[in-house]
Image (cartoon, grey):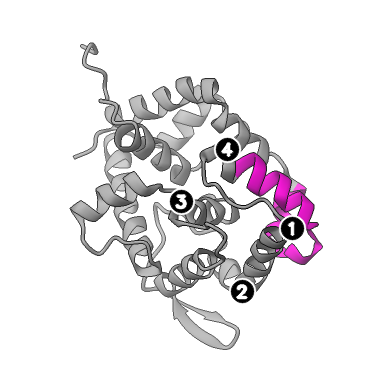
Amino acid sequence: MITWEEFAWAVFYFGVISGDIKRDSDYLTLMRQDQFLQCLRTNPKTIEVDDIREKIISDFLNRWKCRIKNTRGVASAIRTSIKRLLGHLNALHDLRVESFQPDFVVDIEADQMTISEVIERCYGQIRKIGYRFGPTATSKLLHILQPALFVMWDNPILDNYRKINSQVSDSGKGYCTYLLMMQDIAALVSRTFQNPIDYLNTQLQYSPPKTMAKYLDEYNWITITLGVQVPPVWHP
């Protein structure tokens, strides 16, 4: 069972080492581009494909070794996929991984869907972009579109949680199962420490503030992808 101490140590360690590899600064730089992100999330047709190539593919996805082909065709495919998901993304607006209700029903273009079905559709649409758009890149793009809800993962993280729950997989349903597992972890952390995200953002002074979804990714990356023990063995 995860504790607040383990979670906080992982987040702290991530902040220490990510400065050396620059990946977190790339993430924060992107998240500060309010106008670009607002257009990407609500009116992607106004975004130039070269901006997507630079800001999404080159400066974000491929800094995390997603190895996406950085061409105008790929950038255009990303833009088209997001455009097709606008109604679904709007239905997920303001939802947080800590509290979303998977069975809640929403109206999307005259159809009724549960939140879990919307999440599944979003993952499936981005996953089929092609051009080496695997599970890592899919989750990272989804996170940029809805940073409070979508938790990023990579192959080691996916494999780890699939061992715990066989329903986790590289699919819409499998990713939604993963998000529900992340919701459980967030609940455990919040039960052992009040307002953990406010505290972490205050202490670590991130600008813009990070979400629980981002901190969950950092915990997973440190403890699973890197295999670091938290707290460290020398901690009293």
Q: Is residue 10 left or right of residue 29?
A: left
The overriding secondary structure of the stretch rendered in magenta is: helix
- As rendered, which of 235 and 140 lies closer to the eye? 140
For marks 2 and 1, give the CA distance: 25 Å
Q: Is residue 112 above or below residue 120?
A: below
Q: Is residue 137 left or right of residue 233?
A: right
Q: Is residue 18 above or below residue 192?
A: above
Circle 4 sits in a helix, a strand or a loop, which is it? helix
Which of the two discs, 3 and 1, sits closer to the camera?
Answer: 1
Of callouts 3 and 1, the N-terminal one: 1
Residue 87, which numbered label? 2
For marks 4 and 1, give the CA distance: 18 Å
Of callouts 3 and 4, the N-terminal one: 4
The residue located at (26%, 18%) in the rendering is 232
Of callouts 3 and 2, the N-terminal one: 2
Of callouts 2 and 4, the N-terminal one: 4
For marks 3 and 1, give the CA distance: 21 Å
Q: Which residue is mark 1?
A: 72
Question: Which of the image's four quarters has the N terminus?
Answer: top left
Q: Is residue 208 visible?
A: no
Boundaries of the magenta span: 35-60
The residue located at (56%, 54%) in the rendering is 141
Residue 136, which numbered label? 3
For marks 3 and 2, give the CA distance: 23 Å
Q: Amino acid at mark 4?
A: Arg
- As rendered, which of 187 and 206 lies closer to the eye? 206
Residue 63, which numbered label? 4
Which of the two discs, 2 and 4, sits closer to the camera?
Answer: 4
Pinpoint residue 230: horizontal percent, then vertical percent. 27, 25
For marks 2 and 4, give the CA distance: 29 Å
Q: Answer yes or no: do the residues labelled 2 and 1 have beta carbons within 8 Å?
A: no
